[in-house]
């Protein structure tokens, strides 16, 4: 099967006593954050490095080597390095200014109708399209790390092999220490955590605070006793501020509600000032905006509110506005015939081309989760109309996903026998899926007991691959019905070797290989077969599995997975991901001391120790939503 969307045949209670009242965000504090001057984004030197085809040739995977016949034009890196230097020279004077090289700019949002400003800005933008390799002194100053960042790196060695055995769990002790050392400070306050602190690897953009990566850290801080809610609140407020920027890529302005993928603190040594720099996808490899960031932000805000019982933050007008802006991007009318969200490839945790364009389950499940969190947090009076829009979407979305994304043995058999070319509303095969497009592996993979939400559904295209994040989020948000949640856990149990293997957990299954890998990933040397996003194993996902296990009453399954992680993760230096069919090898390009591998482990442990902790990241079934009328499943 040659289609790019189908994978290959594979052969082979919150601790109540620990809750404390959170220090409230004075309104002035939040406002001052939102009024500070323009801050610019710039393409970063680090982000333009492309993995060389050579890297891919040295595959250490059991499946052997990938042949890659692409050439990265040598001039690309040089040109972009110069871009970075030019951009960095731009000083922060508080006025909205477009910076960059004609590619990227993120600035404070200008007032509506400020066309004159726009003209001036675009003139400036044109002027900045020349590149120079010379680095003026003032530029060098701006390239230095902020004091907060450098202290992280300096502290790195100090924590090596020096973990006291507290509470009989040295691994947790080590994890907490490492987590603390990854904190990023802005104006003296913790605002997030570095993605990784690997002194031996090139930083690329791993020295930034990623929104999605911070979620497990935020949850760890909320679960901790005593709770450390300040960092979570600061993170939520700062990222909200960043949302307020005008986001531009090549003179095209992104939607107002878009949240950054990541941000960092820049220290201007000359002025002795810190400022924030955000990336909305304008610097990211592939230039894709992170659709998941806004959803995670809403989900974390709800967790914070639930856990601290501090409703003042979520009810601030500016926070209410932020929630609406995020969801407005998704609720606006258009040409859609589906209630699911149409997305570009690489718009979520899998932030490279992996054939997840269309309607990826991860985004749909996060969308549903965020809608339901917003329903709880929006002001019932002032947000009435908006809440009604949310209610309608939740109903349509849950029906669509429960119906059309669900696959189990019975449903697979139905699709296998589909007729095609059916016209009109009586069609059974509504999306005209051609049964021959079902990949062979799925017939073996599908157990008699169990089922899952497949990766993607759109006209004539069903991506049958398993994606862990989408399925676990569907359980936690109760997008999955009770019976579907049970069936998903049954499937994980039945396919333990494939989905958990030696190191939890497979991000997706199976891996793309050969021709499919070439077509679907575009010869991506980082996403080779059973590596990274293409069937690699990600320890961070342990927390999602654990939460799903607890919610469905199967803590033993989570404990089994945690035991596997405990055998190696710390010894291996907390890698970002593992490679190989059963996850036996530390990932080819995996960063060590990856923060969310650390925090993911911590929250998995804290949820097992106190299952009530999952209430901050789980929603009960919405009784108002009608159950699917048609029962297609053998599992329910
Ligand atoms: C990689 C991952 C992405 C993560 C980032 C920082 O790009 O694909 O999901 O957010 O690293 O850890």
Image: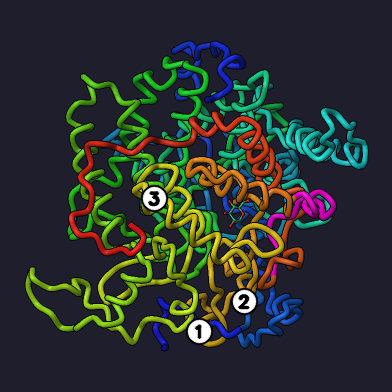
Look at the image and name its color scheme.
rainbow
**Residue 575 colored magenta?**
yes
State whether the magenta stretch is mostly helix, strand or loop.
loop
Position in image of residue 99 (x %, y %): 51, 46
Q: In this view, does 346 lie to the left or right of 428?
A: right
In the image, residue 524 sits, relative to residue 292, either above or below, namely below
* Whether residue 118 is visible: yes
Mark 1 residue element: loop
Magenta segment, which residues? 566-579
Instruction: Specify the label residue 9 is tagged with.
Output: 1
Q: Nearer the viewer, mark 3 or mark 1?
A: 1
Residue 635 locus on image (x, y percent) = 36, 60
Task: Decide which of tag 3 and tag 1 comes sooner along the chain.
Answer: 1
Q: Mark 2 points at which residue?
A: 529
Q: Earlier in the sequence, mark 3 or mark 2?
A: 3
Q: In which quarter of the image is ligand 1?
A: bottom right
Name the residue rendered at 40%, 40% in the picture. Answer: 246
């Amino acid at each position: 099967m040659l289609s790019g969307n189908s994978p290959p045949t594979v052969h082979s209670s919150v601790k109540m006593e620990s809750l404390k009242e959170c220090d409230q965000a004075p309104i002035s504090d939040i406002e001052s954050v939102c009024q500070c001057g323009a801050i610019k984004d710039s393409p970063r030197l680090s982000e333009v490095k492309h993995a060389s085809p050579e890297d891919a040739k040295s595959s250490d995977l059991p499946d052997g080597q990938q042949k890659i016949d692409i050439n990265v034009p040598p001039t690309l890196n040089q040109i972009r390095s110069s871009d970075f230097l030019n951009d960095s020279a731009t000083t922060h004077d508080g006025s909205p200014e477009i910076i960059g090289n004609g590619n990227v700019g993120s600035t404070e949002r200008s007032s509506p109708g400020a066309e004159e400003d726009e003209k001036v800005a675009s003139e400036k933008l044109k002027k900045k399209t020349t590149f120079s390799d010379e680095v003026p002194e003032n530029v060098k100053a701006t390239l230095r790390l902020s004091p907060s960042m450098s202290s992280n790196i300096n502290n790195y060695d100090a924590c090596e092999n020096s973990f006291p055995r507290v509470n009989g769990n040295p691994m947790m002790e080590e994890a907490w220490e490492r987590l603390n050392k990854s904190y990023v400070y802005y104006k003296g306050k913790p605002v997030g955590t570095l993605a990784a602190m690997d002194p031996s690897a090139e930083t690329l953009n791993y020295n930034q605070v990623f929104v999605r990566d911070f979620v497990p850290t935020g949850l760890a801080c909320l679960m901790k006793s005593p709770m450390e809610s300040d960092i979570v609140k600061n993170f939520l407020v700062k990222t909200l501020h960043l949302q307020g920027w005008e986001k531009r890529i090549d003179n095209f302005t992104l939607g107002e509600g878009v949240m950054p993928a990541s941000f960092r603190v820049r220290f201007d040594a000359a002025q002795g000032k810190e400022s924030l720099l955000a990336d909305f996808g304008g610097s990211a490899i592939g230039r894709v905006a992170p659709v998941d960031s806004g959803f995670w932000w809403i989900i974390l805000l709800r967790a914070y509110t639930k856990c601290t019982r501090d409703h003042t933050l979520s009810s601030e007008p500016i926070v209410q506005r932020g929630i609406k802006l995020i969801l407005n991007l998704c609720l606006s009318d258009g040409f859609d015939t589906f209630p699911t969200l149409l997305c570009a490839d690489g718009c979520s945790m899998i932030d490279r081309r992996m054939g997840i364009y269309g309607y990826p389950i991860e985004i749909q499940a996060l969308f549903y989760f965020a809608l339901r969190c917003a329903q709880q947090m929006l002001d019932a009076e002032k947000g009435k109309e908006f809440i009604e829009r949310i209610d309608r979407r939740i109903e349509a979305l849950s029906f669509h996903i429960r119906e059309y994304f669900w696959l189990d043995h019975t449903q697979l058999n139905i699709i296998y026998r589909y007729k095609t070319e059916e016209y009109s509303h009586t069609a059974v095969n509504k999306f005209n899926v051609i049964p021959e497009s079902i990949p062979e592996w799925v017939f073996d993979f599908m157990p008699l007991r169990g089922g899952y939400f497949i990766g993607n559904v759109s006209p004539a295209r069903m991506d049958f691959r398993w994606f862990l994040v989408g399925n676990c989020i569907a359980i936690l948000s109760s997008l999955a019905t009770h019976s579907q949640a049970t069936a998903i856990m049954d499937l994980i149990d039945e396919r333990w070797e494939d989905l958990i293997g030696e190191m939890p957990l497979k991000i997706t299954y199976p891996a793309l290989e050969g021709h499919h890998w070439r077509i679907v990933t575009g010869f991506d040397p980082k996403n080779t077969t059973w590596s990274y996003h293409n069937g690699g194993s990600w320890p961070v996902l342990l927390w999602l599995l654990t939460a799903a296990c607890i919610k469905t009453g199967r803590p033993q399954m989570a404990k089994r997975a945690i035991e596997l992680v405990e055998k190696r993760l710390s010894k291996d230096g907390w890698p970002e991901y593992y490679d190989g069919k059963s996850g036996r090898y530390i990932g080819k390009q995996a960063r060590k001391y990856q923060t969310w591998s650390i925090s993911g482990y911590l929250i998995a442990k804290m949820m097992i120790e106190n299952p009530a902790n999952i209430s901050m990241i789980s929603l009960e079934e919405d009784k108002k939503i009608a159950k699917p009328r048609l029962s297609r499943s053998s599992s329910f």
